[in-house]
Image: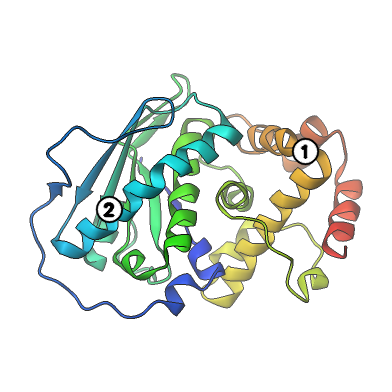
Amino acid sequence: MLVVLVAELIIASNLLADAAPVPPVPVAEPTVQSDSAPPVVGDGRTVQMISLGGTRTDELLTRITSDMGGAVDAVERFWGTDWDREIIVIATDTESQFVAQAGLNPNGRWSDIAAVSVADGVDFARHHADGQRIVVAPGAAAISDAALRIVVTHELFHFAARADTALDAPRWLVEGTADFVARPPTPLPAGAAAETTLPSSAELDEFGPQRAMGYDRAWWFARFVADTYGVESLRRLYVEACGPGHGDFDTAARRALDTDLTELRARWAQWLNR
């Protein structure tokens, strides 16, 4: 079963919307970016960069290579080091390439997506994911360096946590935690406290501004947990709520945060109104 986690945080930051249009380039045969030994990052992980066409994808992979060391460091600080030693990144040159490599629905709306983390299958008993790779969309070539660092780190967290993330994990917490690892904290915008219910995965299924707000709210919740209960408690909450065999969110909150949903909602509302 193909497993896909999507970096839709791009629309939350309006990164692709603000990028200048990039003209298409001729499609080339897939190539490994360099004939030399793959880069080594973090605690000895190797990075294989695969370009699916043209100068634009080669240049994008060069930028991603420069970001990968910092991304690995950020993920290891939060998640630890027990995850795949080889990181594979595929840069696509057309939307059809992106959809095919990512295993997405060709009839879906993916123009606001910068990258996905994909696995061909996960064996939770062996703590192993087969065919892991990060697939980068053509539009990522046009985003800023700061935005690209966020995308790379966000997707790398999904890559690292794959074997610890159940297929039915609450997507809002999966994505919110990835954003916590990837995005630098910024002041909450005016009106952030207008909605004080807990985030939901349904908010991520919209298109455009509604989905952007859903991703932001998931990110804010992860920040709230880290600020209020500690970063390690956020990691425990992820394991309890998103790991294989997880229970409901109420049970996960009790185990990880030693609180119930009533108190959690109250403190969440206070955090939003601070």
User: Residue 28, can we see it?
Assistant: yes
Q: Residues within 10 Å of mark 1 (few under 14, many from 20)?
A: some
Q: Where is residue 98 drawn, in percent x and y?
A: 27, 60
User: Residue 3, can we see it?
Assistant: no
| Residue beneath the point at 29% across and 60% down | 99
Question: Which residue type carries mark 1?
Answer: Gly
> Disc 1 on helix, strand or loop?
loop
> Disc 2 on helix, strand or loop?
helix
Quarter of the figure with residue 38:
top left
Residue 133 is left or right of residue 11, and the answer is left
Q: Identify the residue under disc 2.
A: 61
**Can you tell which of label 1 and label 2 is closer to the viewer?**
2
| Residue beneath the point at 53% across and 33% down | 76
Residue 109 is left or right of residue 25, and the answer is right
Give the CA distance from mark 1 to mark 2.
35 Å
> Foreground residue, 258 or 219?
219
Image label count: 2
Q: Identify the residue under disc 1.
A: 230
